[in-house]
Image (tube, rainbow, N blue to C red):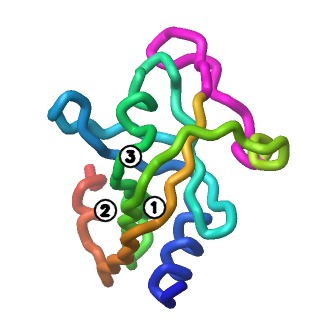
């Protein structure tokens, strides 16, 4: 695994949520999803009720996570692209996800899980980022 890939995996392990993007009937969509890192792959948990898992399963997807809202002076972003596959997580993987949300858009959260095999991984860094201070000043 290239050095940039290791760095990306390390950064993804630091944040619990990111965004998965794909297309559904030729229309792009992005969904916030919980992720964990297992053996250099991303495992995602999202709400089955959205139906996004049907568009993701077996298709190339883009996943992005970052620390943009952390207030840190240095911001990183990880782009992780690969093929998503529906999975049944092992008991250990299921436990790593932590507590399942109670509701999704007012409906009981029904988890569905996907694994992304990495095909393209990229890490981006911004240093001395002033935007957070400006966006949140009163």
- Mark 3 or 2: in front is 3
Please give left or right for residue 87 compared with residue 128 in the image: right
Q: Residues within 10 Å of mark 1 (few under 14, many from 20)?
A: few
The disc label shown at residue 70, or none = 1
**Residue placed at 76% from the left, 41% from the top?**
94
SS at mark 3 in the image = strand
Q: Position of residue 54 (x, y in %)?
A: 42, 28
Label 1 to label 3: alpha-carbon separation: 20 Å
Q: Which quarter of the picture shows residue 70?
A: bottom left
Q: Nearer the viewer, residue 125 or 53?
A: 53
The disc label shown at residue 120, or none = none
Please give left or right for residue 125 compared with residue 3 in the image: left
Furthest residue in direction bottom, as rendered: 3
Magenta-highlighted residues = 96-111
Q: Which quarter of the picture shows residue 63?
A: bottom left
SS at mark 1 in the image = loop
Q: Position of residue 117 (x, y in %)?
A: 51, 60
Residue 102 sits inside the magenta stretch: yes
Magenta residues, dominant SS class: loop
Q: Residues within 10 Å of mark 3 (few under 14, many from 20)?
A: many
Q: Residues within 10 Å of mark 2 (few under 14, many from 20)?
A: some
Furthest residue in direction right, as rendered: 91
Question: First in sequence: mark 3 or mark 2?
Answer: 3
**Residue placed at 44% from the left, 15% from the top?**
105
Q: Position of residue 113 (x, y in %)?
A: 59, 37
Q: Nearer the viewer, residue 25 or 91?
A: 25
**Residue annotated with mark 3:** 20
**Residue annotated with mark 2:** 132
């Amino acid at each position: 695994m290239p050095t940039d890939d290791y760095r990306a995996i390390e950064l993804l392990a630091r944040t619990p949520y990111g965004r998965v993007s794909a297309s559904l009937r030729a229309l792009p969509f992005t969904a916030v999803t919980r992720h964990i890192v297992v053996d250099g792959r991303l495992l995602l948990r999202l709400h089955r009720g959205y139906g996004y898992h049907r568009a993701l399963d077996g298709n190339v997807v883009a996943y992005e996570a970052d620390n943009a809202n952390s207030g840190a002076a240095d911001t990183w972003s990880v782009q992780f692209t690969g093929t998503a596959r529906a999975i049944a997580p092992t008991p250990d993987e299921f436990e790593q996800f932590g507590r399942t949300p109670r509701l999704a858009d007012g409906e009981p959260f029904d988890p569905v899980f996907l694994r992304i095999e990495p095909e393209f991984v990229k890490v981006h860094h911004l240093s001395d980022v002033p935007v957070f201070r400006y966006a949140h000043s009163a």
